[in-house]
Amino acid sequence: MMIAWSLYIPVSMLTLSICANYMHYNSLFTIAIIFTSIVIYIN
């Protein structure tokens, strides 16, 4: 499970950063990254 999360985090952050560059919603994606990080740490 931890291996899956360690692979999921960089891929999701890369995807979010690419989407943020195209859509210019940097603050929204930053909140999404923080939220997913909190959920991961809780689990």
Image (cartoon, rainbow, N blue to C red):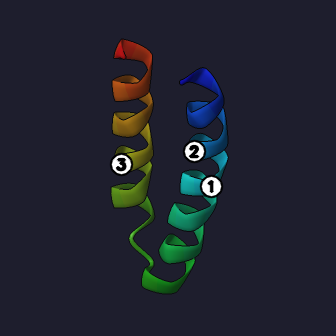
Which amino acid type is shown beneath numbered disc 3? Ala
In the image, what residue occupies the spot 66% across and 47% down? Answer: 10
Q: Residue furthest front?
A: 1
The disc, 3 or 2, on the residue closer to the chain's N-terminal end is 2
Picture coordinates of residue 1, whole percent (x, y): 53, 24
Which amino acid type is shown beneath numbered disc 1? Val
Circles 1 and 2, Cβ within 8 Å, touching? The answer is yes
Give residue 11's mark.
1
Picture coordinates of residue 6, whole percent (x, y): 65, 33
In the image, what residue occupies the spot 54% across and 54% down? Answer: 12
Residue at the disc numbered 3: 32
Badge 2 element? helix
State the separation of the CA atoms marked 1 and 2. Answer: 5 Å
State the separation of the CA atoms marked 3 and 2. Answer: 14 Å
In terms of depth relative to the viewer, which is nearer, 26 or 19?
A: 19
Horizontally, is 43 left or right of 14 in the view? left
Residue at the disc numbered 2: 8
Horizontally, is 14 left or right of 42 in the view? right
Circles 3 and 2, Cβ within 8 Å, touching? The answer is no
Horizontally, is 24 left or right of 6 in the view? left
In the image, what residue occupies the spot 45% across and 64% down? Answer: 26
Q: Is residue 15 above or below residue 30?
A: below
Horizontally, is 30 left or right of 31 in the view? right
Which amino acid type is shown beneath numbered disc 2? Tyr
In terms of depth relative to the viewer, which is nearer, 28 or 9?
A: 9
Q: How many marks?
A: 3
